[in-house]
Image (spheres, grey):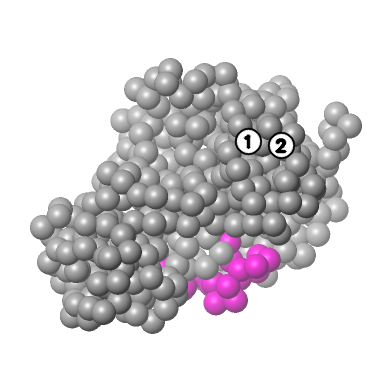
Amino acid sequence: MRQIIDLHIHSKYARATSKFFDLAEMVKWSEIKGVDIISCADFTHPAWYKNLNTNLEQVGQSGLYKLKNSDSKVRFIISTEISCIYRQADKTRRLHLCILMPDLEAAGKFNQALEDRGAKLASDGRPILGMSAKEVLQIMLDIDERTMMIPAHAWTPWFAVFGSKSGFASLTECFEELTPHIKAIETGLSSDPIMNWRLKELDNITLVSNSDAHSGPQIGREANVMDLKNKTYDEIVDIIAKKDKQRFLYTIEFYPAEGMYHVDGHRDCEFFCLPKETEKLKGVCPKCKKPLTIGVLSQVNKLSNISESKVDKTKHIPYKSIIPLPNIIADYYGMGRGSQRVQKLFLDIISNPSVDGGNEFKVLLDLSETELKKIMPDVLAEGILKMRQNKIKIIPGFDGQYGKVEIFSKAEKEEAKNNKQGELF
């Protein structure tokens, strides 16, 4: 059975997260987006952990949980993100790490182990730990060997295992003798699988993709698609650990140029450039003469040892790049994705009776051209087809600023502004 899985989100207890982002909101938006299994988020936070124990119940012995008193088919997996800030080899390291636990009991033991070492878990849903990634991994393994650590958004500059500002040149440098326990990394919004495939060290590492959502509408902007037979925690981590191409069908990816750190730049000066230009500029902003924030593309170029043309794609799990449907509609109308007109058409489309299952992924991934044109304006349907064929233009993101997608021509946007057709669906 095809299951869409998002292993990394946050709750209302995490910094810069929607105050409405509770379990019911997670279920609601998972159903809207078409996500079947979602992270429970932030289980290290004491108040949230109590909330999870009160409001979730395990489905049999599966290690997956459902919301109590709900008939929703959405399931929760016990996972969270932590932040490690520490010194190693005379350099300050800052890493974000995704942590998967087989059940809430194991998560509670992990929380207690961190508190015993002085961690202030109530400070944030994503706590800052003054211990190494390797030390945290050993704590996890001592609790339960079924736990899994996945370096989060592995290439972003400031908080990532390969980050240009405070990361490492290899997984081995970071995790040393425990490196064999690292079975996967998270690509993050600013890189896609083919960029990661250029690093030989990652040949046997599974690439996962998750939303890192801070609000409901962000759920599933990246995700993992697996063929699950038993729908259990153990099955999911086994598929990841074995890089099982038969059961791990594909990942759903942001176009990396849309990510906040894809190319090099300086946001204050509204300046960005590609890696070759950065070399010419010696890493200095030409406007203010301050250092540029070196993005993911440059860091991949620096650490990679395989050219893109020589990547053997058959060795790896495939992927599909998408643009969230509200973003496509927003570009069509030439207005913000949160505007009333965009949201109305979005909800009208996914709730159309002809959309079996009624969710965003059905529309983006599954419907034919004919089916799409039955539930939306023809030009908008053609925009989805352009996305599937990678026939889009993106102004790249840099230094913490998202990239901008351009799908429709000026004439098509002008037609959409003056045409009420979209409100008829």
Name the amino acid, label 2.
Answer: Leu
Residue sitting at x 42%, y 21%: 309
* Residue drawn at (55%, 56%) of the image: 402
Residue drawn at x 83%, y 47% is: 130
Q: Which mark is residue 27?
A: none
Q: Is residue 25 magenta?
A: yes
Residue 239 in the image: above or below residue 270: above
Which sits in the foreground, 199 or 141?
A: 199
Q: Quadrant of residue 59?
A: bottom left
Residue 216 location, x and y as percent? 47, 68
- Asked whether the beta carbons under mark 1 and mark 2 sit within 8 Å of each other, the answer is yes
| Position in image of residue 224 (x %, y %) | 40, 45
Name which residue type carries label 1. Answer: Glu
Q: Nearer the viewer, residue 110 or 340?
A: 340
- Residue identifier under label 1: 277
**Residue 76 percent location from the top left of the image:** 46, 58
Q: Residues within 10 Å of mark 1 (few under 14, many from 20)?
A: few
| Majority SS type along the magenta span | loop
Residue 199 against residue 421 in the figure, above or below: above
Residue 374 visible? The answer is: yes
Question: How far apart are the alpha carbons under marks 1 and 2?
Answer: 6 Å
Residue 133 seen by the camera: no
Dot 2 crowding, Cα within 10 Å, few <14, some 14–19, many 20+: some
Residue topped by disc 2: 281
Tell me the residue at 35%/75% (across/down).
342
Q: Is residue 70 above or below residue 251?
A: below
Name the image quarter holding the C terminus: bottom left
Instruction: Give the secondary structure at mark 2.
Output: helix
In the image: residue 30, left or right of residue 356: right
Q: x, y (%) of residue 169?
A: 69, 27
Magenta stretch in the rendered image: 8-29
